Amino acid sequence: NKLLKDNAVPTIFAHAEIKKKSGK
């Protein structure tokens, strides 16, 4: 479960980056 949790953080940042690019 820890591995899944650690993987979730980069995923959240990746989605934020995608949203930033989409918003531009």
Image (cartoon, rainbow, N blue to C red):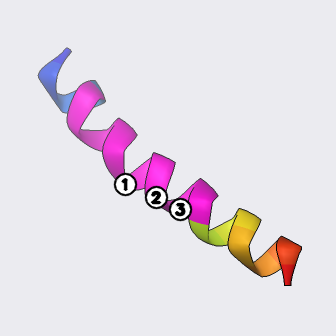
Please count the marks in the image: 3
Q: CA distance from mark 2 to mark 3?
A: 4 Å
Which residue is disc 2 drawn over? 13
Q: Label 1, label 3: how many angstroms apart (C-alpha)?
A: 6 Å
The amino acid type found where label 3 is placed reads Ala
User: Helix, strand or loop at disc 1?
Assistant: helix
Q: Are marks 1 and 3 in contact (CB under 8 Å)?
A: yes
Neighbourhood count class around disc 2 (C-alpha, 10 Å): few under 14, some 14–19, many 20 upward: few
Q: Residue at x 21, y 38 (%)?
A: 6
Q: Residues within 10 Å of mark 3 (few under 14, many from 20)?
A: few
The reply to whether dot 2 and dot 3 touch (C-beta < 8 Å) is yes
| Quadrant where the N terminus is found in the figure | top left
Rendered residue at 29%/27% (across/down): 4
- Left or right: residue 8 versus residue 2 is right
Which residue is outermost to the left? 2
The answer to the question of whether label 2 and label 1 lie on touching residues, with beta carbons closer than 8 A, is: yes
Pointer 3: what residue? 14
Q: Is residue 16 above or below residue 6?
A: below
Q: Main secondary structure of the magenta part?
A: helix
Q: Is residue 5 above or below residue 22?
A: above
Judged left or right of residue 10, residue 15 is right
Question: Residue 20, percent across and down?
Answer: 71, 73
**Residue toward you, 22 or 7:** 22
Residue at disc 2, secondary structure: helix
Task: Give percent across and percent down for residue 12.
Answer: 48, 47
Q: Which residue is mark 1?
A: 10
Residue 1 is inside the magenta segment:
no
Q: Is residue 2 left or right of residue 21?
A: left
Q: Amino acid at mark 2?
A: Phe
> Is residue 3 depicted above or below 24 in this figure?
above
Quarter-of-image position of residue 9: top left
| Highlighted range, magenta | 5-16
